[in-house]
Image: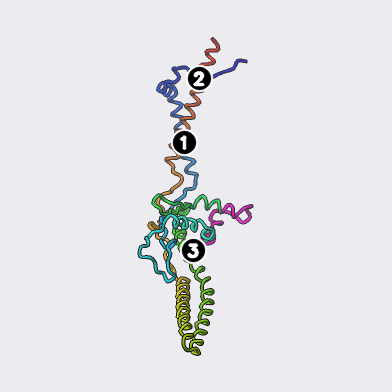
């Protein structure tokens, strides 16, 4: 049995003649591919997309006193470190758990508790439809896609708002944890000051001067502790802006996926290239077989 090898003649590479010779095949292939891809795109459920653009506030990274006094030289926006922290909060389990509960994402995505791995399926859906990324301008872009255009808009805005809530919660928890320790330190220092005051009433001469000097130092330290306590108390009750929203999400008017025109163009072009390749190879094989007969 003879081996059949595809050898292409120089005239077969003439693109113009090749297209003219198989023009009918290309027309039928292109029309069929365009019609099929358009039909498939109609069967795909459309997704709508809403986006939020926000910057991290300088409150995330700047050093403030607990009374909220910030440096006069502080920038309005946070730095790269603040952007990374904001992204971590947006992608945190706290935000994801909040969205799951608030929007019943298990039911919305059609995931039943009887599924083998329901939580994993929900996480995969969220990873697919909910995205957050850093832009070239140092801002954070939150995008949400969903079949329900209004829900996509609400979720995007909720994610941005939730980030602010989480930052304030972390701040209040940290300040509240300091209150008990500062209160205990204040009580101990107050007792020490009172002991020096009692000693001062019973002492005279050079000894009283030494006690007075020590009393001044300890009283000053007592005032410092009291100031820190008041600052922690203020922070435990404050709500500060940690995000600056540039563009809030709005309800999308057009679908984001699928793009029917792009699907049709790409599918048609791919079908034509494949048809051309098949015809080209078939033509080369045919020529080789003809040569073998001679």
**Is residue 105 part of the magenta span, yes or no?**
yes
Which numbered disc flags the more N-terminal residue, 1 or 3? 3
| Mark 1 in CB contact with mark 3 (< 8 angstroms) | no
State which mark lies toward you, 3 or 2. Answer: 3
State which mark lies toward you, 1 or 3. Answer: 3
Which numbered disc flags the more N-terminal residue, 1 or 2? 1
The outermost residue toward the left is 72
| Residue annotated with mark 1 | 267
| Residue annotated with mark 3 | 166
Q: Nearer the viewer, residue 177 or 143?
A: 177
Pointer 3 local density, CA inside 10 Å: few below 14, some 14–19, many at least 20 = some
Which numbered disc flags the more N-terminal residue, 3 or 2? 3
Q: Is residue 205 above or below residue 171?
A: below
**Regarding mark 2 in the picture, which secondary structure is present there?**
helix
Q: Residue at x 45, y 84 (%)?
A: 209
| Mark 1 in CB contact with mark 2 (< 8 angstroms) | no
Pointer 2 local density, CA inside 10 Å: few below 14, some 14–19, many at least 20 = some
Q: How many labels were placed on the picture?
A: 3
């Amino acid at each position: 049995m003879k081996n059949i090898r595809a050898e292409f003649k120089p005239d077969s590479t003439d693109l113009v003649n090749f297209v003219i010779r198989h023009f009918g095949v290309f027309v039928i292939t292109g029309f069929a591919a365009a019609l099929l891809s358009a039909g498939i795109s109609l069967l795909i459920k459309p997704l709508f997309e809403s986006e939020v653009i926000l910057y991290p506030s300088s409150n995330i990274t700047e050093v403030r006193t607990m009374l909220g006094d910030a440096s006069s030289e502080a920038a309005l926006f946070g730095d790269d470190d603040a952007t990374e922290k904001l992204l971590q909060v947006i992608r945190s389990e706290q935000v994801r758990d909040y969205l799951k509960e608030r929007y019943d994402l298990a039911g919305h995505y059609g995931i039943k508790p009887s599924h083998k791995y329901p939580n994993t399926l929900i996480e995969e859906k969220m990873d697919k439809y909910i995205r957050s990324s850093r832009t070239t301008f140092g801002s954070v872009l939150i995008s949400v896609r969903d079949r329900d255009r209004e829900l996509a808009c609400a979720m995007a805005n909720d994610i941005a708002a939730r980030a602010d809530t989480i930052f304030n919660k972390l701040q209040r928890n940290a300040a509240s944890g300091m209150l008990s320790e500062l209160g205990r330190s204040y009580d101990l220092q107050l007792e020490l000051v009172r002991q020096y005051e009692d000693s001062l009433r019973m002492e005279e001469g050079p000894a009283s001067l030494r006690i007075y000097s020590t009393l001044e130092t300890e009283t000053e330290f007592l005032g410092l502790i009291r100031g820190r306590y008041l600052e922690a108390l203020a922070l435990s009750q404050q709500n500060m802006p940690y995000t600056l929203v540039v563009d809030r999400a709005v309800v999308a008017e057009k679908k984001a996926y699928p793009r029917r025109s792009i699907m049709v163009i790409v599918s048609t072009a791919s079908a034509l290239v494949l048809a051309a390749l098949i015809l080209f190879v078939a033509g080369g094989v045919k020529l080789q077989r003809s040569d073998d007969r001679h």
